[in-house]
Amino acid sequence: MSLGNNLPLASVPGFGQTAEHNFLPFDLPLLGHMGTWGDVHIDTIVLAWACMLGILAAAAVVRPMLTANGPGNKVQAVTEMLYDFCKGIAKEQIHDQWRPFFPLIAAIFIFVLIGNLIGILPWPAMWNSIYHSMPGFAEKYKEFEVAAPTTDFNVTFGLAVVALITYLGSGFWAHKVKYLKLYLNPIEWMDLIIRPATLSIRLMMVITADEILRGAALMLAPVIVPTGVMGFEMGIALIQAFVFALLTSIYIGLTVAHH
């Protein structure tokens, strides 16, 4: 079982590297092997892009189903629920000026949520079904596990930097050059480090702890217990996506409202 060479879990017993085994059912110069290639985290890049492409594909499929006349179908109900949830986060923290920042808040919430959930999918069970249906394929490619891209500090820190740039930009957008006066106080400079650090480290550590918990549960009790752990992880995935989007909204709201 492998969670990729770029993750803290690579050093945990039972989560060894499998660089010699292909992850994909075909050979590609770089993507054929998950893990790291030099200083490049291939698995993180693949999974992060898979999240983004999956979200865009889902949006393209859902968009024609939406209607302004009548209640719409179940897909529209779920979409409106997600919209209202993200709108509530942005509007309650940024208040009257929430609209320009709503797309970012919604994008952060959805991306972090999907990224967290990717690691919870029962990849070994999927592999076992392939193993029994395609034995020749299974003999060539080893069983694998997939970790959430949010267990990689590069991803969580990148999201935190986006949040940092946005709330700094929102301050100048709202207060123009006068916003520079705020940073005459050296304490305010600490926020430029503390806020991104807490955003990125919290998300990475919590999701990584969940991955370790599930791995331990699978090793100790391969049936029943991991199901409960996976249900718990789904709740944590939702909470962490909410917290990241909420804190980003709070930081933006503070800069926009600061006088």
Image: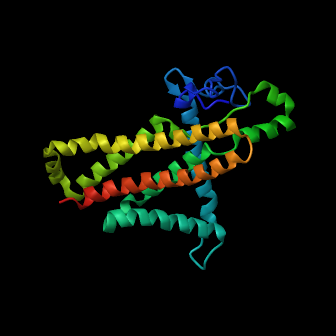
Give the quadrant of the C terminus: bottom left
The front one of 79 and 231 is 231
- Looking at the rendered structure, the number of numbered marks drawn on it comes to 0
Residue under the image location 61 percent in, 77 percent down: 71
Q: Is residue 70 above or below residue 107?
A: below
Residue at image position (53%, 40%) is: 209
Q: Residue at x 66, y 72 (%)?
A: 73
Question: Is residue 244 left or right of 185 when viewed as pictured?
Answer: right
Q: Position of residue 104 (x, y in %)?
A: 42, 54
Residue 59, x across and y down, in percent: 58, 57
**Is residue 45 toward the left or the right of residue 128 in the image?**
left
The quarter of the image holding the N terminus is: top right
Q: Position of residue 91 (x, y in %)?
A: 38, 66
The one of 213 and 195 positioned closer to us in this rendering: 213
Residue 54 against residue 97 in the figure, above or below: above
- Quadrant of res 69: bottom right
Q: Residue furthest front?
A: 220
State how the image is colored.
rainbow
Taking 256 as reference, is 107 left or right?
right
* Residue 165, above or below 39: below
Observer-nearest residue: 57 or 123? 123
Q: Residue furthest bottom?
A: 70
- Left or right for 31, reference 175: right
Residue 26 spot, x, y in % from top left? 73, 28
Tell me if I can see residue 54 in this picture.
Answer: yes
Let me know if residue 158 appears in the view.
no
* Residue at (64, 25) in percent of width and height: 33
